[in-house]
Amino acid sequence: MRLNELKDRDGATTAKKRLGRGIGSGLGKTSGRGVKGQKSRSGVAIKGFEGGQMPLHRRLPKRGFNNIFARKYNEINLGRIQAAVDAGRLDGSKPITVAALKDAGLIRRAKDGVRLLGQGEMKSKLAFEVTGASASAVKAVEAAGGSVTLKTITGRERPAGDQVKADRRANKRVEVQAKADAKSGKGAKPKPKQPSAADGAEPAEAEAKTAEPKAPKKGKATDADTKKPKPKPAAAKKDKS
């Protein structure tokens, strides 16, 4: 092949439409737009208009939503990683990070991180530092003697999502139980302080003092008692004889 023989593939480029160049071209006079009417004018877009009736895109029901916070991960299976280690593209003695996977050509670019999946067989003992991993992948890696450390795309370590949820549930149960105990009055009451020899009194004497019952105090006279009228003395009966 020579330089003058280089060309694009057939269909890669098309010639520009030459409009209004006579009836022999097939696109003369009205340029393929027909005669008059709204659609023959420029600046008109009647996409989805059905003459005034309810258009199709409004008749169909809508379901779900688009999560604007959704993250996109590079998903990679254990089988591909094991094949790369066997081929010598990955160094199994070093941690398998996002940068190492990119250098080995297993991923094209790091999106929001790498998620490890469990399809394939893992034979080598590898230490992974990835953004996410499935339960089957973690189980297979640990069975081969390796480890999986979950890190964010910035490199900071973070606990597994299941562990975070379990801790939140446990804390919530503790809070609910504490509120229930406080409402029912079953809260822990402070225990009385036991006297010791360091306080200056012997333990036996202290126990005797605590065992002595206290005499009930006399109640103070209330206003009702003071305002009660005193009974009048009975009048002596006169002797009629």
Image (cartoon, grey):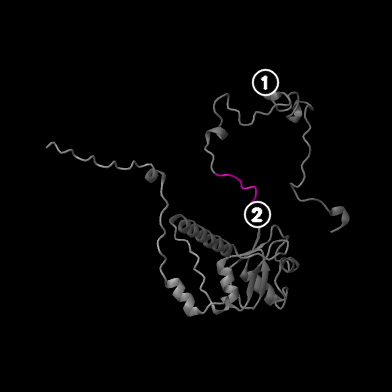
Q: Secondary structure at mark 2?
A: loop
Question: Residue, x 41% and y 47% (percent of image)?
Answer: 222
Residue 188 is left or right of residue 198, and the answer is left
N-terminal of the two: label 2 or label 1?
Answer: 1
The image quarter in which residue 29 lies? top right
Q: CA distance from mark 2 to mark 1?
A: 48 Å
Considering every residue shown, the one lying at the far right of the view is: 3
Where residue 229 is drawn, which disc sits there? none
Answer few, some or many: residues within 10 Å of disc 2's Cα (few below 14, many 20 plus, some between 14 and 19). Answer: few
Q: Is residue 94 above or below residue 225?
A: below
The image quarter in which residue 133 lies? bottom right
Q: Which residue is mark 1?
A: 37
Q: Which residue is mark 2?
A: 71
Question: Residue, x 57% and y 65% (percent of image)?
Answer: 163
**Mark 2 vs 1: CB contact within 8 A:** no
Residue 9: percent from left, percent from top? 76, 51
In the image shown, does 231 or 137 lie closer to the viewer?
A: 231
Question: Residue, x 18% and y 39% (percent of image)?
Answer: 237
Which amino acid type corresponds to the residue marked 2 in the rendered image?
Arg
In the image shown, does 151 or 20 lie closer to the viewer?
A: 151
In the image shown, does 35 or 65 lie closer to the viewer?
A: 65
Boundaries of the magenta span: 64-70
In the image shown, does 237 or 23 lie closer to the viewer?
A: 237
Q: Main secondary structure of the magenta part?
A: loop
Question: Residue, x 63% and y 71% (percent of image)?
Answer: 148
Q: Secondary structure at mark 1?
A: loop
Residue 188: percent from left, percent from top? 48, 64
- Magenta-drawn stretch contains 67: yes
Residue 124 is left or right of residue 201, and the answer is right
Considering every residue shown, the one lying at the far left of the view is: 241
The image quarter in which residue 227 lies? top left
Q: Is residue 121 visible?
A: no
